[in-house]
Image (tube, grey):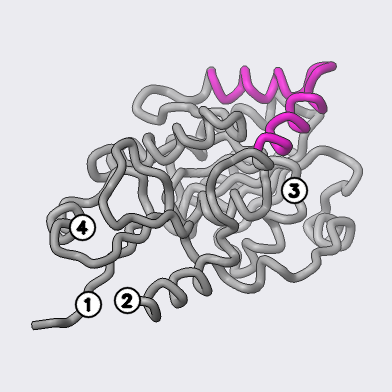
Amino acid sequence: MGVKTAIHDSNTRLGLANRVCGWFADLFMLGLPTEKPLKKAVLTSTPIRREFTEPVDRKALLENLNLNASLPTALVVGGSQGAHNLNQAIVQATKQTPQWQFIHISGERWYNALRESYRDVTNVAVLPYSHEIYALMKAVDLIVCRSGASTLAEVIYCHLPAILVPFAHAAANHQYYNAKILQEAGCATLICDAKNPTPQLCATFKELSGTAGNDLLRNLRQSYQTLAIPNPMGATKHIIQLLCKL
């Protein structure tokens, strides 16, 4: 019919519909690099919200959560619905890692139970949800999260050291392969959720709390400088430019 077509897939493992449609599309835009090269493909990254460019006052934000701005701080996010296995693992990690403090976004479903679990713990702020995730991500030293493509785009923009715990039941295990990209680039640690993630998560925080902890965090953050993925904040403009040229 003479109509130009374009596709954008944010994951490194493409969905079935996009793989099929890719044979007929004039342009295939990618949020993350794929294992095999694709014809007519351009790596654009995945667009993120403009709010991520806003400055953040770390001290004020953490003190508002009754946390100490001078302590290393981790943000824990399991997705909008929370993540039971990850939540339970973090409860154990917080109790074994008094050197760190945590902002734990639990999900509405798990909020009351986690507040009870943290009743005698002073180094954790528990939130059911946050509409200001962009401010939290820019204020902390580390994030523990799933590895959906949109989350990773935000992590990449913030150059945020990460412990990635992919959702084990994601289609075609695509979150695992997303996480592998940051792990192999030296930006993140990958922990599988299919098994009990608690021992490895606790061991990782123990390592980060040791004498080499600051160096480990610094190396994770610096590794983003060589990550071969375009700045997500420029993705929207890049995508529009490519579409206008079709």
Q: Secondary structure at mark 3?
A: loop
Is the C-beta separation of discs 2 and 1 under 8 Å?
A: yes
Residue where numbered disc 3 is placed? 140
**Mark closest to the chain's N terminus, 2 or 4:** 4
User: Three-letter amino acid code at disc 2?
Assistant: Leu
Residue where numbered disc 2 is placed? 246
Pair 2/4: label in front: 2
Neighbor class of circle 3 (other Cα within 10 Å; few <14, some 14-19, many 20+) is: many
Q: Secondary structure at mark 1?
A: loop
Residue where numbered disc 1 is placed? 4
**Mark closest to the chain's N terminus, 4 or 3:** 4
Q: Residue at x 71, y 50 (%)?
A: 125
Pair 2/3: label in front: 2
Q: Is residue 120 magenta?
A: no
Q: Residue at x 50, y 29 (%)?
A: 190
User: Three-letter amino acid code at disc 3?
Assistant: Val
Q: Is residue 218 magenta?
A: yes
Residue where numbered disc 4 is placed? 18
Front in this rendered view, residue 122 or 174: 174
Disc 1 from disc 3: Cα separation: 43 Å
Is the C-beta separation of discs 1 and 3 under 8 Å?
A: no
Is the C-beta separation of discs 2 and 3 under 8 Å?
A: no
User: Three-letter amino acid code at disc 1?
Assistant: Lys
Dot label at residue 208? none
Q: Residue at x 89, y 57 (%)?
A: 59
Q: Is residue 244 above or below residue 181?
A: below
Q: Position of residue 143 (x, y in %)?
A: 63, 43
**Mark closest to the chain's N terminus, 2 or 1:** 1
Left or right of 107 on screen, residue 68: right
